Image: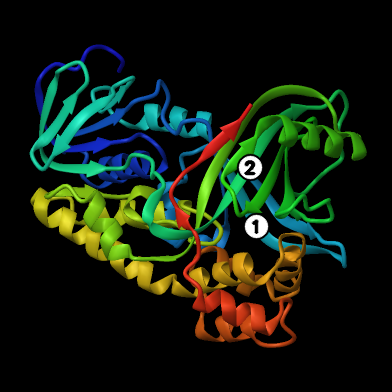
Amino acid sequence: MNGRTSDRRTEIAIVGGGLAGGLIALALRRQHPEMQVTLLEAGEALGGNHRWSWFDDDLDAAGRELLAGFRKTRWNGYSVRFPAYRRRLDSRYNSLASPDFDAALRRELSQDTIHTGKRVATLDAKGVTLEDGARISARAVIDCRDASPNRHLRGGWQVFMGRHVRTPRPHGIEQPVIMDAAVSQHGAYRFVYVLPLGASELFVEDTYYADSPVLDRSALSGRIDRYLDAHRLQGEIVGGETGVLPVITGGDFAAYQAELRTEGVALAGARGGFVHPLTSYTLPFAVENALAIAADAELPGEQLAALLEARARRHWSRTGFYRMLGSMLFGAARPEERYRIFQRFYRLSPGLIERFYAGQSHLADKARVLTGKPPVSIFRAIGALLGKGAPLVADREQA
């Protein structure tokens, strides 16, 4: 629905139609089909311009059921490449593109639920005011807008540029290459991510774990060109995406929550802190939260906000191991040597790798990651763990 939103009343107003907001609306529709839900998105499409990927075991049965209606690309296995070796793994891997996310939600949600092209001016515990002056009163408000850099969090950055390519002939790639780190490192941990979307279609993404949030479009585009040339994969460009994501290594999460808190408004998605601090994965946590919110959807707004804030604190606590590893990545390894950490990691068992990405590492997993010959200097690692790290305060882009 794209017409003017007049003053109205709804039970739950969701601000932000990205992954978190869209999945919350879908879970509410499934569990409470009669509940009035309003999903507000500033852009013209739900999900923006993104691609989300995950392993089968990242989700439980309920999570897989929530995503069952989305058109996805699936593969039985994937590979990684490093200077020292190449490895194939048999784990099932999935990918969902934002146009398919948008299409599925429009099929399943009622017509009066989705409101795109609606920018929010203010929100509070009792509703949302749009830039056009319209007011939407609500029993509960959930803020799922994008996260922004924050002085209370510390770490580095994941900078990326992706390109969707249609090749003039079949490319012959059957499984994804999750990490091709056998490439020049350029002052960061650099790897190329390759998804075969069809016999003649590829998604190729150049990613950097960098100290700076600068996204140099010209440099990254040129490097993708050279990668495609080297692998004889050049073709028609049919789409793409860019991004700069925080890699969180520490900080004061209570202060972060206090700064973003609007009394009585629930925070979800990356804005609420529901992200893997090292990989920037969000999908497993967005699914988990959507189902949890649907289960308690009849709570008063203030109680729902408190529930989500407590869930975010628990998430921060249980992901401390990954923040520690991030500190070692940025603080203990020289930029051109950071690939050695992942090169060692991908020699471990497939199950451990999957649990790592889902943020579900067992105690034995953590011990296994930390034992053996370290890929970085012990002294530099100790220094990294004792240091505070750089504040996540700005993102910049170069043409």
Q: Give the mark nearest the N terminus, 2 or 1.
A: 1
When asked about the image quadrant of residue 370, the answer is bottom right
| Residue 45 visible, this angle | yes
Dot 1 alpha-carbon crowd within 10 angstroms: few under 14, some 14 to 19, many 20 or more = some
How far apart are the two marked residues, 2 and 1, measured between alpha carbons? 24 Å
Question: How far from the left and from the top, in percent, is residue 234?
Answer: 85, 29
Q: Foreground residue, 149 or 294?
A: 149
Q: Quadrant of the N terminus?
A: top left
| Kind of element beneath mark 2 | strand
> Which label sits in the foreground, 2 or 1?
2
| Residue 36 visible, this angle | no
Please tell me the numbered disc located at residue 388: none
Q: Is residue 343 above or below residue 38?
A: below
Residue drawn where x is 23% and y is 65% of the image: 310
Residue, disc 1: 92
Question: How far from the left and from the top, in percent, is residue 48?
Answer: 47, 31
Q: Foreground residue, 129 or 363?
A: 129
* For residue 52, side relative to residue 234 (left or right): left
